[in-house]
Image (tube, helix red, strand yellow):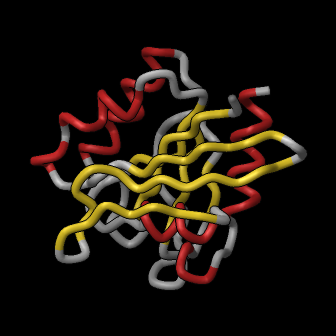
Amino acid sequence: MGKKIVIFGDYDSGKTTTLERLCEKTVKIEYNGITVALDYGNMTIDGEKIHLFATPGHERFRFMLEIISIGLDGAIIVVDNSRGVTLVEERIMDSLEDEGIPYVVFANKQDLDDSTLKIGRDVDVIPTIATENVGLFEGLKTLLGKIS
């Protein structure tokens, strides 16, 4: 079966780009360049299949989060480092912590703002630049280490 990892984050944080750079194959469901249902990709690490799903970031698709989250083994929260942690991302972290689901935070867009992300939680924060595939694989391996 493999591991199910869901990539969360607010609108335009870099979720789809993160998934695309990590995966061998991806399926995007978009309308005018905006994810409307989910993005899916998969990869194999150390012989184990990893299924990655990226959620839509727009508020009108918030109901999809619950559907996509069923049965997840771990999560990546992609934060636009130049914007900081949003209320949407805070709520997602609260929910994951309440459910005891392991997660990591990708402080994305380090090329725009390389300051330290202020998060106020005991969680691994990985500096990333999704467009350049910087830090993504290392962050995924960190998450997988929390799941195994």
Q: Position of residue 112 (x, y in %)?
A: 45, 83
How many discs mark residues in the rendered view? 0
In front of the other: 112 or 59:
59
Q: Residue at x 73, y 61 (%)?
A: 137
Residue visible at 53% across and 84% down in the picture: 111
Which residue is found at the position 45% from the left and 26% from the top? 96
Which is nearer the eye, 25 or 97? 25
Q: Decide which of 10, 70 is in the foreground and name it.
A: 70
Residue situated furthest top in the rendering: 99
Q: In which quarter of the image is the C terminus?
A: top right
Lateral position of residue 15 relative to residue 11, left or right: right
Indicate whether 21 appears above or below 141: below
Residue 141 as seen in the image, left or right of residue 136: right
Expressed as whole percent of the image width and height from the top left, the position of residue 94 reads 38, 26
Residue 20: image quadrant is bottom right
Give the quadrant of residue 90: top left
Q: In this view, does 35 lie above or below 74?
A: below
For this orientation, the residue located farthest to the right is 46
> Could you tell me residue 119's position as x and y percent?
46, 46
Q: Residue 89: name its quadrant.
A: top left
Above or below: residue 143 compared with residue 12:
above
The residue lying at 55 percent from left, 73 percent from top is 130
Quarter holding the N terminus is top right
Q: Position of residue 84 (x, y in %)?
A: 36, 60
